[in-house]
Image (spheres, grey):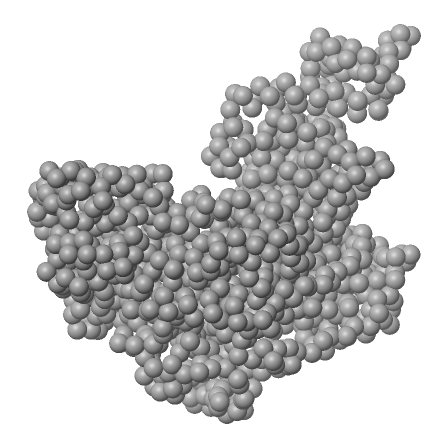
Amino acid sequence: MRLIRVMCSGRVDLEFILRAFANGQDGVFIGGCRLGECNYVTHGNFDALGNTLLAKMILTQIGVNPERLRIQFMNASDGILLAESINSFAKTIRELGPLGKGEGLDIGLMRLKLEAAKKLVPYLRLVERERLRLPEKSEEKYRKFYGSGEMRTLFDQLIVEKLAMAQIMLLLKESPLSTGEIAEKLSLKPSEVSNYMNVSSMHGLVAYDSAEKRFHLA
Amino acid sequence: MTLVKKPRYIIEDKCTGCTTCVKYCPVTYPDQFNQELSENKAVHIYFSQAIPLVAYIDQSCLYLKEKKCLICESVCKADAIDFSQKEEKLEINVGAIILSVGFEPYNPALKHEYGFGRMANVITSMDFERLLSSTGPHAGEVRRSSDQKHPKKIAWIQCIGSRRVTPGDNSYCSAVCCTYTQKQVILTKDHDASAECTVFHNDIRSYGKDFERYYQRAEKLSDVRFFRSYASIVREDPQTKNVFIRYATNGDGVVEEEFDLVVLSVGLNPPANVKELASKFGVALNGHNFCDIKSTNPIETSRKGVYVSGGFQGPTDIPESVFSASGAGAQCGQQLSYRRGQLSEARVYPPERDVAGEEPRVGVFVCHCGANIGSVVNVPSVVDYALTLPNVVYAQEQLFSCATNSAMQISEIIKERGLNRVVVAACSPRTLEPLFRDTLLEAGLNQYYFEMANIREHNSWVHSKEKEEATDKAKDIVRMSVARSCLLAPLQEFDLPVNKTALVVGGGVAGMTCALSIAQQGCEVHLLEKEKTLGGNARRISHALDGMDVQKFVRDTIKAVYQDPRIKVYHEATILDVAGYVGNFVTTVRSEKGLSEIKHGAGVIATGAAEYKPTEYLYGQSGRVMTQLELEEKISAQDEAVLAAQTVVMIQCVGCRQEDRNYCARICCGHAIKNALKLKEVNPGADIHVLFRDMRTYGFSEDYYREASNQDVKFIRYDVDGKPTVELGDEGEGGPVKVGVRDQILGMELGIDADLLVLSAAIIPAESTQEVAGLFKVTLNPDGFFKEAHAKLKPVEFSIDGMYLCGMAQYPKTIAESISQAYGAAGRVLTLLSKDTVVASGAVCEVLENNCVSCGACITACTYNAIEFHQTPQGRKARVNPILCKGDGLCNTKCPTGAIYLKHFTDEEIESQIDAAPGPGVLAL
């Protein structure tokens, strides 16, 4: 395990988490103060918890096992807890095997999907602010909300489509592709892809080459 | 005074605290810090937070005893062992002395009945405290000594050595045991959710701030029982060594129950050898052999210039010890303010070299830390590796980078080689980052160009058996730090001027005491009072429980305030606006002086509290019903009806310790006892009944409770579910009232015709609290009292820098406690105002205005109120006030455009470390 110092777990950006995975790390561990015992007055560890739970949903969507991301709350004298927690996390990661391989994913495609998710971070911040912020800082409430049907619906409505679009954009950056080819590569339904392509054409992000019968970036 | 300094046989300046000597020392010895429950070595560090964090050698050492061994000397690479040290006598001149000698835990071995020392599984709460600690005898595992098993059934017996008049015990209440036991129960359940915890107690005394909720939290845990009964230890099982306790139940009479472990909640005794100590310092002791103190100034001893703080004042908890310590500092300041700062020396650094235009030139220093790193990590190979990294122009190894000569060496090499970044690969930045930053400053380099690579705690200490991997990991850590260091920017810490003036809000006992102390330490004070006269609640109180003449004290204090030319009093004052920040506040006030704009460096909130106006028990409907404060006033005014009352009933906990005010108002039990004793004094035949839930006469107040009981004041316990009933008597509104209550011991309903019904009404936050909190941007607790920055570490400070609090504004407290806290606040205020400047960190946030879209995401994230919008030619933009920013960086993760960034922890800096980390692997943030 390699450690990076931040002054507050609330400083751990979604970008950092996704970047670490995109770089090929097998696991990411976030350590923060015990909930309710913030070193500052901001209680940023709750934000870290929210970010972690959201990142886990994104990883799941990409096909990466969410167990590869863990957050542990502890105080400065919890040395034993830290050691136990890291040992058990290391064990989990060893059992899961190398990133992507353990999940049986196409590594190139997984990286592309992680890159695509990274590009979504500014948008995800807006979603978090507008729709995912909880009035009460309680671990139980956070975990309940992020596991709820309401959250699932929000995620499907607000994030899943954006993730797919970002992935398509990255694919098209490599080479022009047809709707069918995109659908195959990303394991999506052709109808879904054609829907996304219509929206993207309208926004002027992609263009259709009728001769090649393929989309390319506009 | 003359001090005797015993030899520690270690040269403190040379010892780096690496503990190699401890590892090799052959002598094991019972660890004093861990209550002798585990072993330590003859050479050891007393405990892991010891200051200084260096070793010492005790008398169990083989060399000291038999002149042999000397292994430590040969393994210490810092040459810090020195057996030639002798006892030294030091003579020092001091202007004042503070006695913070603490207390001694009660020793239950003195009494056979407690079973301690006779039964292996009867231990003290101090023993149990160590068992629970991660630095304790079993690294945080609770094991009982008879068989090293985890106890499942644990009992605590309260009031061991306390609240007992039998020989060998103390008559007073030790004040802290109820709550520490609840803490131990909660921690025990944290350790082992299946543990069964039983607490045998008398009254539950949860009288401190937020303690009532804490008690409820402990009590609600599964398999936790709080049982009100005297409990005695009967015997132990000769085979299992389990302990049997006998106690009384309501339904089943006396029963015996078996426990795996019994914890004796021992009380607080005066410090060891207290009489010798007292005679040496010439201070008087009270009847309990604690320091003799007076309510008018509980920090003063009987000898001028000798002050007392903490446990030696009497049983006291951590917050009170902390504020009496600050208060003792303040009183020394009052006495010695003319000498303030005379022993301090200012550091002078060379001018800072501008390296902004240069390519990064990184120097890497890899520390062996004696054997701590060097015996695991191949340090020379890490040095060689560092030299291959981009931008690294210099690398070397050092035995101890933190040693004075090593730091000087770093400084020399920076200058010699023109380094503009320095990486020290050693230990945690927590302890030594300030030292190395200073080293850079000495070399004329901006201190933020320093980066620490932790190859000890993160590496050699955890991978001592995997030397090769640890060496590889050290290289990774160095690579990550070098990558980050190249992106570091020079940051300026800036000095803010401090206006050496204080504003004190509230002219009651706390506010006046605080103002006087600040003034006597040489600063100007503006004192605001909302009424026409000073004095606050204390004007209504004649005497304190211990006999203190409150009216005389208030008169003398008011006079002193008016006579002090440095204090400016504003009567009928209202605050209209507060602007500014630590060192530089501007508060606008309307008062009898008209409109004033007060500039001040610090602010103290001492707005007090109020007595609750009851709506229950016929208050306001019958002339016979009154509050304790009203009774006190009537006694002082010699009200005939009151003095002649034959039957008096007092009801405790009126308006609090219930759902809507879930706290104990702390002072009402003492207040009731005081008034009951006063009534008995004028009319010894009066029949007084106190209906109570728990009598909370903590500390020495217990003596007055006992006195009242001896004078035949009757105490009848009731439950929150079975509150007393009150109705008008046959004579209607003017006549006696009928009080009904269920006596739990007799098991029957009692009816009392009371000539007087006195309600011990709750203490509630002052009316102005919300408004004042809003103006100063400080926070309140769930009960509406002002919330200190930290209950124990910062009990008189707000989380907003430069703001302090004292008195009942923080929580109900006695006059003596208010005075003590007021001195404490004055001490903290002077810590700020005695400086010419305050330094604000350079690692704070800043906004790239071109990227700011004015969405306000950062502003809502910042609970320090450090970010505000301001108008620019390009529209509204967020701007950070670097003085208020604390550098946590939460706002960074909220900004959708990356406009706001935390200096020293920018996205680029952190991402450079993520990218330089070896993959695949595991990354921790």
Q: Is residue B307 visible?
A: yes
Query: Is A190 or B658 nearer to us in this picture?
Result: B658
Residue A110 percent across, percent down from the top left:
70, 28
Q: Of residues B344 and B12, which is closer to you in this image?
A: B344
Residue A99 relative to residue B409: left or right: left
Judge left or right: residue B359 versus residue B466.
right
Residue occupying image coordinates x 81% and y 37%: B851
> Can residue B22 be seen at all in this image of the molecule?
no
Q: Is residue B577 above or below residue B139?
A: above
Classify residue B807 by image quadrant.
bottom left
Most foreground residue, B287 or B134: B287
At a point 10% along the width and 60% down the height, the residue shown is B685
- Which residue is found at the position 35% from the left and 46% from the top? B612
Quarter location, residue B599 = bottom right
Residue B480, position in %: x, y? Answer: 73, 52
In the rendering, at what x and y percent does residue B349 appear? Answer: 79, 72
Q: How many numbered badges does the structure rendering display? A: 0
Q: Relative to B447, is B923 above or below?
A: above
Residue B185, position as x, y percentages in the image:
33, 51
